[in-house]
Structures are given as structure tokens and as C-alpha cells.
Image (tube, rainbow, N blue to C red):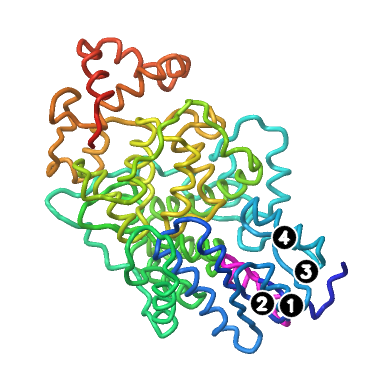
Amino acid sequence: MTTRDDTPLWLFADQLGPAVYGGEHSHREILLVEATSALSKRPYHRQKLHLVLSALRHAERDLGDRATLIKADTYTDALERYGRPVLVHEPTSHAAEQFVHRLKKQKLVTDVLPTPTFALPRAEFTDWAGDRARFRMEDFYRDQRRRFDILMDGPDPVGRRWNYDEENREPPPKKQATLGAPKPYQPREDDIDEQVRSDLDRMDLNTVGVDGPRLFAVTPTEAKRALTRFIDHRLHIFGKYEDAIMGQDWAMSHSLLSVPLNLGVLHPLDAVHAAEDAYRNNDAPLAAVEGFIRQILGWREYMWHLYWHFGPSYTHNNKLDARTRLPNWWTNLDADTVTAECLRHALAGVRDRGWTHHIQRLMVLGNHALQRGYNPRQLTDWFATAYVDGFRWVMPTNVIGMSQHADGGKLATKPYTSGGAYINKMSDHCGDCEYDPKKRLGDDACPFTAGYWAFVHRHRDMLAKNNRTQRAVSSMDRLKDLDAVLEQERARTHF
């Protein structure tokens, strides 16, 4: 079907920014759809549904006469009711992409355009990937910096170093309960949010987590304010403490931009250029700026492209044969039944906000799941539904590859697991915990410390062949109480 110049443009709920509907498409009418079947398909976090509906309805208001918002049971119902074929950009999941191509065969969609909400087009990543069997984020990240001329001094990186990770791993400051960073931007709720909250109450969907104030930007204007607030007041201390955890400071100095980025209302290059400008203007140190840019232009783009490159079967990977079903206290976000302070705080963060920062995701929740052998596909689905920024493309490579090593090392060179010592170093949780991070045996043995050795024992053959993990196996073989630790962990039912 030929796309006419006046063909309307259909926007999915994660394509709500001017990069999608502006520029060459600024003359087109816009279709927005609220599909009840999509909202009820999985047990999403209550605040996630609020963010999505708020974003759609604010887009309708902001676009004025250009926009038509249709509320229907399914997307197909809405398109048929709309009565005109539409143009659409590539959606952000395998299932949605297949669905769009079915709609194209039904003549409801005229054409599918490339995704404009990421820096690097999918076709260019395919060229970069070539026939690589293994991938290194560092290679991709450096090529991204060169391609987009970010933090470059001619052919060389600014400061003659690509990576400032070593300066961005400070533990939390001692003798203070919070980092002391200026508060992050928080949008002001309006009549749209009030109506969304009322509608969600009435719909009585199967959700997880609790309702709460809207914490994240859902419009381009709000996203710009959130970015400006971060760059001007928080970026300068971001890098140093980006891996630290403090129990009374859920946001630390993080940007909280993942939601507007994943809704498409903030373009990643806008965030990257703003951070680089802060460095060039001497408003933020290079290590902090590089760490932030690495997250956006490096890791986030990398995860997006590998999602498509690895394909829909990637979530079936389970190389460590992890079969344990997620326990009810986990899926119900029942943090109050958990004793380990780090795990309790992380689960409470998901329950109360649908968000925790990346170290809580990887080294607390992911670490626990890896040690206990939780099913990686179930875990991927959980992260995608319980987190407000967890769209379908985000989690497979982050969970299957990085967190759970279920792809056998295709993405990460070693499993990311640790005992309580790491959590003790990087958080302020252990001092108030009933468990002792130094103990692996006994009633007060840390479940992360003991769980680490149970994991090493369970996968000793695989770990012994990896030069990055061989030492863990040799250390385990010197433990005189290993059998008792293993028996203890097999019987453990509480954490």
C-alpha cells in the first residue's frame, strides 16, 4: 500500500516525543490508542499503568487538534473504528513488530518506518555486528562516541581515556543517612493524572505494587525540565556514587530519566549533548559525565540493539538450568516478610515506586535470583512488568545476559554474583541487618555470603573453566565447612 502525504501517524505509548511526530511528520494527524487488553495482559505495576495512560493523554492534550485518542478493547478495534489506514514507526518489541506487519497485510497500516527514538538506527547496528559471535559493550561504546563525536578531542577521547569506571565506584559516604544531593525533578500532577487514577481504580486491573504520586516525566516539556534539573544540580556528584546504595536515599544522584527515555519523550542524544555541554562548560567533572554518557549512549543503546540482534528466542536461554519458580513473596512484592536489609529495601523500592537503581537491580535482586536459581524467563517477565521503565525490549539482555548469565556468556564474560562483602562495602544496609555479611554458617549467616558459595559449588565446572572465576572455585575448595553451608542453604526458606 502506498503511503500518502496525508496518511495519519499512529503512535505507540513509547513513541510520544517530537522525534517521532515532528520534523517530516509534523503535518500529519496523530492517532493514539488506549487498549484495555494491553493494560490487562500482565500484572503490571500500578504506577507503570498510570505513567503510560498519563503519557498518552498528555500527548493528546499537547498535540491539540492534530491528535485523536481512541479507547478500545484492542488496537485492531481502535484502528477499524478510526476508519483510515495509518503510518507507524517500528514498535519496540518482537511481538508488537509481528502484530504491526499483520496489520499491514490487513491494509490497516500503510508502511512501517525506522525507529527514531534511539541514536543508532537498527540497520547500522546490523552492519556493525557483522558475524561477531561474542559482543563487548566497550567496543560498541567507543564506536558510538566516535560516530556521534561525543567527548572526543579529534580522534582521541577527551582526557585520553575512554573509561572512568574506577573513579565511579565509591561506597556511600560514612556518617550520613543520605547522599545530600539536591532533590530530583518531580512533575506536578494535574487533572489528567487525577482522571487516570480514577479510571484505574474503576478498571480494577490485576496489578502489583502500590499507587503513589507520579515521580517521572511523561511529556517532552517535563522531560526537558527533569534533564535540566539533573544536569544543573545532580550530575556533578552522579559518577562517584552511581554504584552506591543508601537505605534512606532511594534516588541518590541518579537522573531518573529512564522513564521519559523509554516513553520516547526524551531523545537520548539530547541527554548526551546536555551532559557533554556541562563538562565543556566546567559544570561537571569528566568522570561523572562520562559515566552518565556511558549509560545512555553505551549500555542503553547496546541493550536495545542486542534485543533485536539476538531475536525472540533469546529469552528461552537457560544455560545454567535455573528452574526455581519465583516465590510469592517476590512476585507480590511482600518486602515486609524479608529480613535481609538490602533485599527488603530493594523489594520495597519496587513495591512503592516501581523503580530501583541499577546496582539494586543487578547486585541485590539479580544476585539473589542468580544464587537461588530462579527461572530466568520468569524473572525477565517480572522485571518487565514490575518496573515502571521495564518495556519489553529492555529486560531480556539485561536479565538473561547480564544478570543471570543464562545465555552462557554471550553478553557478559562472567556471572555477576557476590557475597555479602560487596553489599556491605557499597551500601549502608549491613549495619542494621540481622544477618552478618562475614558469616556463611549459622542463624545469622548472610544469605548472600552463603548463597554465593552454594552457587559456586553448583556451577563449579563452568566457573573453573573461566579465568575470571577460577579463583572462586579454588577458594571454595579450601572451605572446611562447605558441606554444612550447602546443607544450610538447601534448607533455607527465609531471607
From mark 2 to mark 1, how far is it between C-alphas? 7 Å
In 3D space, how far apart are the residues under numbered discs 3 and 4 (Cα atoms)?
Answer: 9 Å
In the picture provided, is 385 more to the left or to the right than 91? left
Tags 3 and 2 touching, CB below 8 Å: no
- The percent position of residue 383, horizontal first and vertical second, equals 44, 49
Q: Which residue is drawn at 68% across and 47% down?
A: 125
What x and y, as percent, mark residue 223? 47, 71
Q: Tell me if I can see residue 161 in this picture.
A: no
**Quarter-of-image position of residue 490:** top left
Between label 3 and label 1, give the one nearer the viewer. 3
What's the CA distance linking mark 3 and mark 1? 11 Å
Mark 4 or mark 1, earlier in chain = 1
Q: Is mark 1 on a helix, strand or loop?
A: loop
| Disc nearest the viewer among 3 and 2 | 3
- Pointer 2 with pointer 1, Cβ within 8 A: yes
Q: The residue tagged with tag 3: helix, strand or loop?
A: loop
The stretch drawn in magenta includes residue 21: yes
Residue occupied by mark 4? 100
Residue toward you, 235 or 427 = 427
Residue farthest to the bottom, as pictured: 65
Q: Mark 2 points at which residue?
A: 31
Of 144 and 119, nearer the camera is 119
409 above or below 17?
A: above
Q: Measured from the top left, where is residue 298 in percent x and y?
A: 53, 48
Q: Is residue 333 left or right of 98 when viewed as pictured?
A: left
Q: Give the range drawn in magenta.
A: 11-27
Quadrant (top left, top right, bottom left, bottom right) of the C terminus: top left
Q: Quadrant of residue 313?
A: top right
